Image (cartoon, helix red, strand yellow):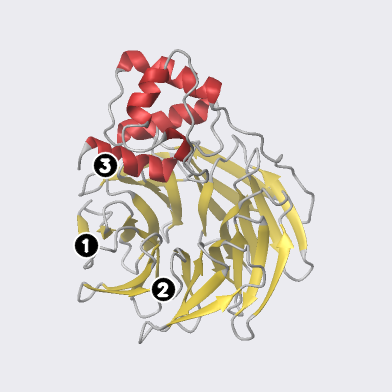
Amino acid sequence: MSKKSLASLIFAGVLCPVLPAQSQSLPDGPGKETVAAYCESCHTFFSRVGSGYTPEGWRTVIRMMANHGVVVPPDQLAVMTDYLTKYFPEKSKPAGVATPGPAKVAIKVWPVPTPGSRPHDPLATKDGAIWYSGQMANVLGRLDPKTGQFKEYPLKTAHSGPHGLVEDKDGNIWYTGNTGALIGKLDPKTGAVTEYKMPDPAAKDPHSLVFDQSGILWFTLQNSNMIGRLDPKTSEVKLVTAPTPKSRPYGIQVNSKGVPFTVLFGTNKVASIDPKTMAIKEYTLPDAGARPRRLALTSDDVIWYTDNVRGYLGRLDPATGQAKEWLSPGGPQSEPYGISVIKDIVWYSESGTTPNTVVRFDPKTEKFQTWVIPGGGNIVRNTDVTRDGNFVLANSLVNAVTLVEIDK
């Protein structure tokens, strides 16, 4: 892969692409030429800068670039960071606040070993470990929360962009290679990696994944607008295109009957996939502006989703098609993201507040409770649940993983 195409992939994934390309010029100042050379070689800087970053955030972004092979001369790093920090600071965000409630938690945070890893998805495995995908470092990481010890496993294909994580019944860790167009399997006992390449050149970005009850692996391909299934016994991969163009299949879960459901982040829809025929059925949410990003299911197979764009927690009953929404405590700009269900209580994170928050919602009382994440949290893209019912988060921009221990 060329350095230019590599840099394009990095910035497409790292700098939030919420602003359209603009005919703007970089402000004059020391470091302008370096930023222009390394941040505009394959795209316009303003199409990727998003809402800006804190000084530490910019240092992390630059380290992510380095992890992916973009070489900035060492004598230019400080001036480049100072320039980005001065002219593109993080824009004001809603305050993350603590809201009282009945639950008690203890929050523990561990920095991961490799700077600029961008931990993307967490995974709580049956042996009590916490795993994470080091997306920019091209590793899978394992934390023993009892000892605080880490181990990182390098992957086979360079710059494969490990993203989603799931464990199989034998303890293997499966992941999506988001920029490598592959599904991978890591054997933690040996470190051996097996890769399953996408059979269609248009299937470029495997995203999130989940096993069904029969051992079939289901996964989404966000920008390719596809949903796939992989049979580990035969290595066969099948793909289907979502009916709505640019619907961006994102988070995916399987209900108690073995039916996969995905949220369509590019539109106001949720979809189910027939596990036998792969036929897709779409459920339209009431608000045209809804953009569901992640989902979790309660024991009654009701879907709970985070509306990342509008700042809502939503509930969809696929049996009736009825939906209901609640404004997240941080408000319309709180950007709810990673979500899980623990004993039919909904837990998620607000990724747009400063600091990020952990949110608890009780469907019976319809009451929220919130906690701020130590160190800021920034950004919780996905979550998981330990076998003993605690909440696990990966924090991309602060390069950490978090365990929320819930007082039973």
Quick one: label 1, few (<14), some, or many (20+) residues within 10 Å? some
Residue at image point 31% right, 67% down: 170
Q: Nearer the viewer, mark 1 or mark 3?
A: 3
Amino acid of disc 1: Lys
Residue named by callout 1? 197
* In the depicted structure, whether residue 95 falls above or below residue 74: below
Q: Quadrant of the C terminus?
A: bottom right
Residue at image point 37% right, 30% down: 39
Quick one: label 3, few (<14), some, or many (20+) residues within 10 Å? few
Question: Is residue 110 among what the camera can see?
Answer: yes
Q: Earlier in the sequence, mark 1 or mark 2?
A: 1
Q: Quadrant of residue 151?
A: top left
Residue named by callout 2? 242
Q: Earlier in the sequence, mark 1 or mark 3?
A: 3
Of residues 177 and 407, the one drawn nearer to the viewer in this rendering: 177
Residue at image point 44% right, 64% down: 246
Q: Nearer the viewer, mark 1 or mark 2?
A: 2
Looking at the picture, how far across and down is residue 152, in whole percent?
Answer: 32, 42
Looking at the picture, how far across and down is residue 297, in whole percent?
Answer: 57, 72
Question: Is residue 136 among what the camera can see?
Answer: no
Q: Quadrant of residue 7?
A: top left
Amino acid of disc 3: Ser
Amino acid of disc 2: Ala
Gap between marks 2 and 3, in whole Å?
A: 27 Å
* In the depicted structure, whether residue 376 falls above or below residue 166: above
